[in-house]
Amino acid sequence: MAGIAALAIAYVLSQFYRAFLAVLTPVLGTELGVTKGDFSLASGVFFLTFALSQFPIGVALDRIGPRRTAAVLLAAGAGGGTLLFAFATAPWMIIAANALLGIGCAPVLMASLVIFARLYRPAKFAMLTSWLVAFGTAGNVIGSAPLAYAEAAFGWRAVMLGLCFFSLLVAAALYLLVRDPDHPEAARKGAAGFSGFVELFRLRVLWPIIPLSAVAYAPSIGIRGLWAGPYLADVFGADVFLIGDVTFFMALAMVAGAFVYGPLDQLFGTRKWVAVSGTSMCLLAVAGLGFFPQTSVGVSTALLILVGLAGGNYGLLMAHSRAFLPPHLIGRGVTLMNFFSIGGAGVMQFATGAVVTHSIDPGDPAAAYSALFLFIALVLAVALVIYLFSRDAKPSHKV
């Protein structure tokens, strides 16, 4: 249990690092000249390096286990990334630091999921995953109003140095406390290495799940982690404290959403239709922001909270795909699906940056954000239609 606790704290850091940029938007823009395009690139690079790391991490999890995989990468990536961030003097250094942070955070949740898959019944997988995600989403909460007040009190460089020290401390805890679950079949067949991913791609049952997995996470983390700050500042003239407060409530909604999704598949006896219902709610909220981007701060905050609440179906979708994974490919299977989830979020960051840049109207600051939200809604709708053709997986489903 001590190892799971250490992984949970590491996942809090992972969630923090993927979402903290929104709060630092004003100060980094003023001090380093970081533009909206730079922020979009920095956020997208985090998800890109995170996603590409999933392939070697998947092999490492099956071959050498979660302990060393998570501890070494967190120390090198998160420790090195925060140090570079703290001493940044130009926008490219912020981008490079986020690339390192993506690599450092990449194995944390996957290490936990491999342990869950090896030690617990498949019926519990969605609940355990969702609840770990919910706990980790506290990083989103810390990266909102608390970060804004810490930055105001100590300065962003001092805050990043403190995060560097804490990241290294958590990495040491992972190495000392996590215990790798025994699984001789995975170790033996793990020698196949990257060819295991080819075997996974041959599982056609995964194909309709992949598109929704690739975009379902993007609305909540993309808006919370990147666009909420510029949107509130440009449309409503919000300062860093109002941005921190709104993103704080959105982050709380993301925590609540992950907790709520946890037991729903067992309660209703279906994973597919719970995911369809939740995704539809998220879609309606994003579309509402797109059609009514400047009604009021209150309305926009309510819709942002609904996006966070309904967009917390990561654990459910992971459990849906996990039900069809062969035992010897658990590590590579969960990292493959996570590649699509995180990679899709990264691609969406790049894409939304382009949408906002090309939709800017000096006379109408809301125009760019209307285009942004409607673009996200359209992509989510297409993925949802494809997902309707997936095979359902009951909570008791075993391979």
Image (spheres, grey):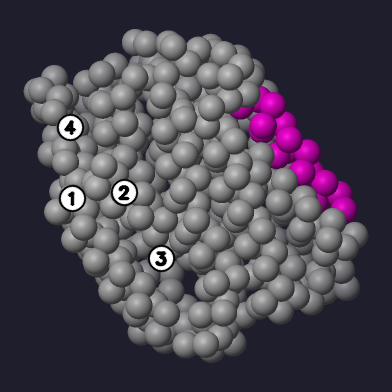
Whether label 2 touches label 1, CB < 8 Å: yes
Viewer-nearest of discs 4 and 1: 1
**Mark sitting earlier along the chain (3/4):** 3
Label placed on residue 181: 4
Q: Main secondary structure of the magenta part?
A: helix
Within 10 Å of disc 2 (Cα), the crowding (few <14, some 14-19, many 20+) is: some
The three-letter code of the residue at mark 3 reads Asn
Q: Is residue 293 visible?
A: no
State which region is magenta. Answer: 275-292
- Which mark, by number, is residue 177? 1
Residue under numbered circle 2: 5
Residues under numbered marks 4 and 1 in contact, where contact means CB atoms less than 8 Å apart: no
- Quadrant containing the C terminus is top left
Q: CA distance from mark 2 to mark 3?
A: 25 Å
Residue with the mark numbered 3: 98
User: Considering depth in this image, is 311 or 361 the residue closer to the camera?
Assistant: 311
Quarter placement of the N terminus: top left
User: Three-letter amino acid code at disc 1?
Assistant: Leu
Relative to 201, say whether 92 is above or below: below
Foreground residue, 210 or 183?
A: 183
Per the image, label 2 sits on a secondary structure element best described as: helix
Question: CA gap, disc 2 to disc 4?
Answer: 16 Å
Image position of 263 with respect to 103: above or below: above
Report the side of 343 relative to 192 (left or right).
right
Q: Nearer the viewer, mark 2 or mark 3?
A: 2
Specify which label sits upstream in the sequence, 2 or 4.
Answer: 2
- Residue 298 part of the magenta-drawn span: no
